[in-house]
Image (cartoon, rainbow, N blue to C red):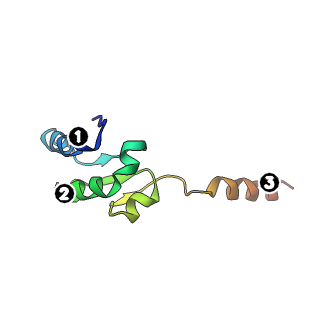
């Protein structure tokens, strides 16, 4: 489902329920990043498990997130360089 503005989230969740979706994955974009609490509230209201691309979504009420931690790339690169040298 595509959502192009915040006022379309409610409709998107209703569509997901009608389609008998078992869970959702929210992609990262400007609209979803700016409406994290609304998305988390709708997911809880509709009892639809939802996974998010960043940890701050979970901090704002989302069930869970899966993705790289901010700044982890630099730390991981430094660790690998250290092992090589």
- Categorize mark 3 by other alpha carbons within 10 Å: few (<14), some (14-19), many (20+): few
Dot placed on the residue nearer the N-terminal end, 2 or 1: 1
Residue pointed to by mark 3: 81
Depth check, front residue: 13 or 81: 13
Q: Answer whether residue 27 is visible to the viewer in this image.
A: no
Q: At 24% from the left edge and 58% from the top edge, which residue is drawn?
A: 41
Give the number of the mark in front: 2 or 1: 1
| Residue 15 image point, x, y percent | 17, 39
| Residue 2 image point, x, y percent | 30, 34
Q: At 62% from the left edge and 57% from the top edge, which residue is drawn?
A: 72
Distance from disc 2 to disc 1, alpha carbons, whole Å, reads 18 Å
Q: At 22% from the left edge and 59% from the top edge, which residue is drawn?
A: 44
Q: Which image quadrant: the N terminus?
A: top left
Tag 1 secondary structure: helix
Dot placed on the residue nearer the N-terminal end, 2 or 3: 2
Residue pointed to by mark 1: 8
Displayed quadrant of residue 46: bottom left
Q: Which mark is residue 47?
A: 2
Displayed quadrant of residue 55: bottom left
| Residue 40 image point, x, y percent | 29, 57
Tag 3 secondary structure: helix
Give the number of the mark in front: 3 or 1: 1
| Residue 61 image point, x, y percent | 32, 63
Tag 2 secondary structure: loop
């Amino acid at each position: 489902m595509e959502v192009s503005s915040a006022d379309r989230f409610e409709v998107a969740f209703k569509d997901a329920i009608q389609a008998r979706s078992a869970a959702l994955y929210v992609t990262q974009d400007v609209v979803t990043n700016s409406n994290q609490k609304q998305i988390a509230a709708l997911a809880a209201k509709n009892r639809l498990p939802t996974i998010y691309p960043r940890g701050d979504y979970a901090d704002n009420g989302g069930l869970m997130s899966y993705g790289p931690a901010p700044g982890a790339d630099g730390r991981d690169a430094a660790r690998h360089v250290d092992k090589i040298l």
